[in-house]
Amino acid sequence: MAGLYVHIPFCKRRCLYCDFYSTTLLARREEYVRAVVKEIGQRQHEAGEPVRTVYIGGGTPSTLEIELVTALTKAIDSTNIAEYTVEVNPGDVTEEYLRGLKELGVNRLSMGVQSFQDELLQQIGRRHTAAEAIEAVRTAKRAGFENLSIDLMYALPGQTMAQWKADIERALELGVQHLSSYGLIYEEGTAMTQMRERGEIEETDEETENAMYDYLCERLKEAGFRHYEVSNFALPGYEAKHNSSYWDGTPYVGVGAGAHSYIRNVRSWNPDDLEEYIQGIESGTLIRESETLSETDLYNEQVMLGLRTDKGCRLSPSVDRRLTVGKLSKKGLIRVSEEGRVIATQEGLHVLNRVIEELMI
Ligand code: SF4
């Protein structure tokens, strides 16, 4: 079984922390969707396996009118689809729009809430309010969605522990089935990084960030969520099938500007430029870069991705188990399961990149 990722790069405005590829050229949506429909037609079966999960992400897919999502959906072979997710911005959704998605077969929504605090939402440049986020989740439920994921951010400048705890409680109270949570990263070149450099905002210290993360993990566990990936939590049975396939090596085809694909040890990606993408698809001359992963790359990849999950990773015989594993276990950063898989502990998750580096070859 394979996954299909559809990238919609449009955003009404840029969030101040974002370094993803996206554009505010909303006037190009129709011609873009035409190109993506064409690419879906050409490539959706490229993995040689039936498509089981579809994920329309961005950018902001909910900037597309329902007619455009319909055009995308019609192009997708829906025979074997078990999970069909669309990312939505809480500021865009109406009950009518969400009902429209439901009718198209979308059975999972991922909502970029980020915070339930207006001052924090403003500070990071989100265009929705806390009230809109709450209403959007309720609207999604009224529209019949029973598999809802929201994103929440922590370690935002000035964010207090009390605000963070209140956000988590709000998410639980709203009854979402899945939560993705990320600490703010100051990516190079973003507006927030420049604000930090000018001394206008202060970065959250590591101790507070770790305390926020630990609280999140504990509270969600207590509420019955499985912490199945470093940043992802789900009620039993609601783990994201599509995202899980990225972590376990399932092939996926990515269509749209900047989208990545992974099929039989080859990773390829479309140009992350709207013009180049549309022109390339329309004229049949799109140049897709690619790389073939070596045995070592594949091993390192399964360490990197596996350690992010609660299933952990296998170790290569060339890793000195006694030395490396012994050292990391002694520090309380990893544990070894009965099947011999290496799994990061809560302490290990705080310094995951370091742990990963030690176990790579
Ligand atoms: S909506 Fe998402 S993709 Fe668009 S600017 Fe904000 S964070 Fe980036």
Image: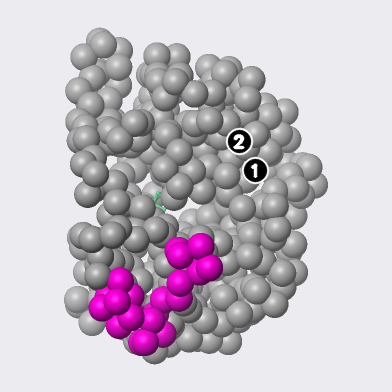
Crowding at label 1, few (<14), some or many (≥20) Cα neighbours within 10 Å?
Answer: many
Residue at far top of view: 283
Q: How far apart are marks 1 and 2 (CA)?
A: 6 Å
The residue type indicated by label 1 comes to: Arg
Q: In the picture provided, is 209 more to the left or to the right than 187?
A: right
Residue 241: x %, y % from top left: 57, 44
Q: Give the magenta-colored segment's residue range.
A: 321-341
Residue 358 tag number: none
Which of the 4 quarters of the picture holds residue 173? bottom right
Residue 262: x %, y % from top left: 35, 35
* Residue drawn at the location 30% of the way across and 12% of the way down: 282
Residue 9: x %, y % from top left: 38, 38
* Residue drawn at the location 51% of the way across and 62% of the way down: 339
Cβ–Cβ below 8 Å for labels 1 and 2? yes
Residue 339 inside the magenta-drawn segment: yes
Decide: is 34 above or below 215: above
Provide the residue designation for mark 2: 84
* Residue drawn at the location 45% of the way across and 14% of the way down: 41
Q: What element carries label 1?
A: strand
Crowding at label 2, few (<14), some or many (≥20) Cα neighbours within 10 Å?
Answer: many
Provide the residue designation for mark 1: 108
Decide: is 69 above or below 128: above
Which of the 4 quarters of the picture holds residue 21? top left
Residue 287: x %, y % from top left: 20, 23
Please tell me which residue lies in front, 23 or 243. 243
* Residue drawn at the location 45% of the way across and 63% of the way down: 341
Can residue 152 be seen at all in this image of the molecule?
no
Q: Is mark 2 on a helix, strand or loop?
A: strand
Q: In the picture provided, is 75 more to the left or to the right than 35?
A: right
**Quadrant containing the C terminus in the rendered view:** bottom left
Q: In the picture provided, is 291 more to the left or to the right than 317?
A: left
**Disc on the earlier residue, 1 or 2:** 2
